[in-house]
Image (spheres, rainbow, N blue to C red):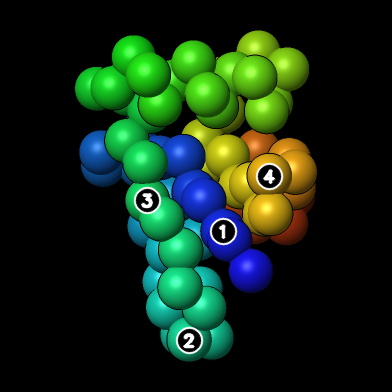
Amino acid sequence: MALVIYTKPGCPYCQQARDYYNSKGISFIDRDAQTSKEFRAEMFKYSDGDPTVPCIVQNGKFVQSGWGDPLRG
């Protein structure tokens, strides 16, 4: 499984997502969408322009933007 999480520094919801996947032993790639224009453009392609982070992409398919119940970010 290829899991990518688009994040921004200091985002508590991004950290919750990281903590969740780490606690499950699920490896992921963390991409800073705030400081990297390339990663931000990738995130927007997956999220249809939604700037909410974290943006979760699994096996090249958009899963969700935001974290928690209800989703926040």
Residue 60 disc label: 4
Q: Residue at x 44, y 20 (%)?
A: 40
User: Mark 2 or 3 closer to N-term?
Assistant: 2
Residue bearing mark 3: 30
Q: Distance of mark 1 from mark 2, alpha carbons?
A: 12 Å
Disc number for residue 18: none
Mark 4 element type: loop
Q: Is residue 44 above or below residue 23?
A: above
Question: Which of the two residues, 41 or 23, is positioned nearer the viewer here?
Answer: 41
In this view of the protein, which residue sits in the foreground, 42 or 18? Answer: 42
Do the residues under discs 1 and 4 have CB atoms within 8 angstroms?
no
First in residue order: circle 1 vs circle 2: 1
Q: Which residue is mark 1?
A: 3
Between disc 3 and disc 4, whose residue precedes?
Answer: 3
Q: Amino acid at mark 3?
A: Asp
* Vertical position of residue 17 compared to residue 43: above or below: below
Whether residue 42 can be seen here: yes
Local SS, label 2: loop
Please report contact status of discs 1 and 3: CB closer than 8 Å, yes or no: no
Look at mark 2 in the image and give the residue it sits on.
25
Residue 5 lies, in percent from the top left, at 49, 48
**Circle 2: residue type:** Gly
3 vs 4, front mark: 4
How many residues crowd mark 3 within 10 Å: few (<14), some (14–19), many (20+)?
Answer: some
Please identify the quarter of the rendering in which residue 7 is found: top left
Which residue shows up at 52% across the image and 24% down it?
42
**Position of 20 compared to 46: left or right?**
left
Residue 24 at x, y percent in the picture: 54, 86
Task: Report which quarter residue 47 is drawn in.
Answer: top right
Dot 1 amino acid type = Leu
